[in-house]
Image (cartoon, grey):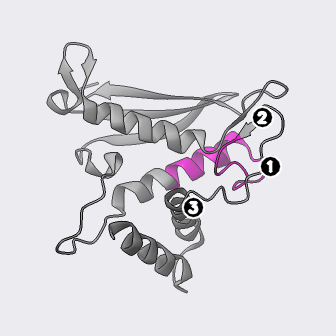
């Protein structure tokens, strides 16, 4: 039931006349992700695989454009909340449920790479022991990697569109 109300809220946001273009596009990507729609992604050919949102930025989109779209997806994931309806289970969202002080930076430090930097992670929340990430931090890292992978492609006869990585830094760095 929670997914249905979330889908309806996303559709309302997409269809509202005062919704900005960037917000509309981010809401559409989130809706596609929830529904499991591949969007306009091309079908796999041979051993090629394309991420769900591979074609969103255009076939020849540069890394800066892809980084912008990943930033928009992260920003939407942070603020989009399910309405609390009595008797409804709350959907988990690792990025939204992370502590407020955590910052997410998406940059392109190299010619063929996108990096998501998760900074200001409180030690008590992010690590369960010396050098051991907590389950909550692993979920955040996995969700960020999924968002980034949705824009990538790979295969034997083609290389990756970009090399993506998620880095985590403790508070105080």
Which image quarter: residue 77? Answer: bottom left
Badge 2 local density, few (<14 within 10 Å), some, or many (20+)?
A: some
Q: Residue at point 43% right, 41% down?
A: 143
Q: Residue at x 37, y 74 (%)?
A: 5
- Name the quadrant containing residue 91: bottom left
Crowd band around label 1 with a 10 angstrom C-alpha radius: few (<14), some (14–19), many (20+)? few
User: Which of the numbered marks, if any, corresponds to residue 32?
Assistant: 3
Badge 1 or badge 3: first in the primary sequence:
3
Tell me how far mark 1 sits from mark 2, CA to CA. Answer: 15 Å
Q: Secondary structure at mark 3?
A: helix
Which residue does the numbered mark 1 point to in the structure image? 59
| Residue 158, label in figure | none
Q: Secondary structure at mark 1?
A: loop
Q: CA gap, disc 1 to disc 3?
A: 18 Å
> Is residue 61 highlighted in magenta?
yes
Residue at 66%, 49% (x, y): give it.
Answer: 65
* Magenta-drawn segment: 50-72
Q: Is residue 133 left or right of residue 72?
A: left
Q: Quadrant of the C terminus?
A: top left
Disc 2: which residue? 48
Residue at mark 2 to residue at mark 3: CA–CA distance? 21 Å
Dot 2 falls on a residue whose secondary structure is loop
Task: Tell me, yes or no, whether the highlighted magenta stretch contains residue 75.
Answer: no
Q: Earlier in the sequence, mark 1 or mark 2?
A: 2
First in residue order: circle 2 vs circle 3: 3
């Amino acid at each position: 039931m929670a997914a249905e109300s979330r889908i309806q809220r996303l559709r309302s946001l997409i269809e509202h006349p005062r919704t900005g273009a960037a917000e509309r596009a981010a809401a559409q990507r989130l809706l596609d992700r929830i529904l499991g729609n591949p969007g306009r992604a091309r079908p796999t050919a041979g051993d090629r695989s394309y991420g769900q949102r591979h074609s969103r930025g255009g076939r020849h989109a540069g890394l800066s454009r892809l980084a912008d779209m990943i930033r928009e997806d992260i920003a939407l994931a942070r603020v989009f909340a399910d309405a609390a309806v009595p008797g409804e289970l709350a959907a988990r969202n690792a990025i939204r449920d992370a502590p407020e002080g955590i910052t997410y930076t998406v940059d392109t430090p190299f010619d063929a790479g996108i990096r998501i930097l998760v900074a200001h992670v409180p030690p008590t929340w992010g690590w369960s022991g010396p050098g051991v990430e907590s389950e909550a931090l692993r979920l955040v890292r996995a969700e960020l990697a999924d968002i980034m992978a949705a824009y990538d492609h790979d295969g034997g006869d083609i290389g990756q569109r970009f090399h993506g990585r998620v880095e985590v830094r403790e508070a105080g760095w």
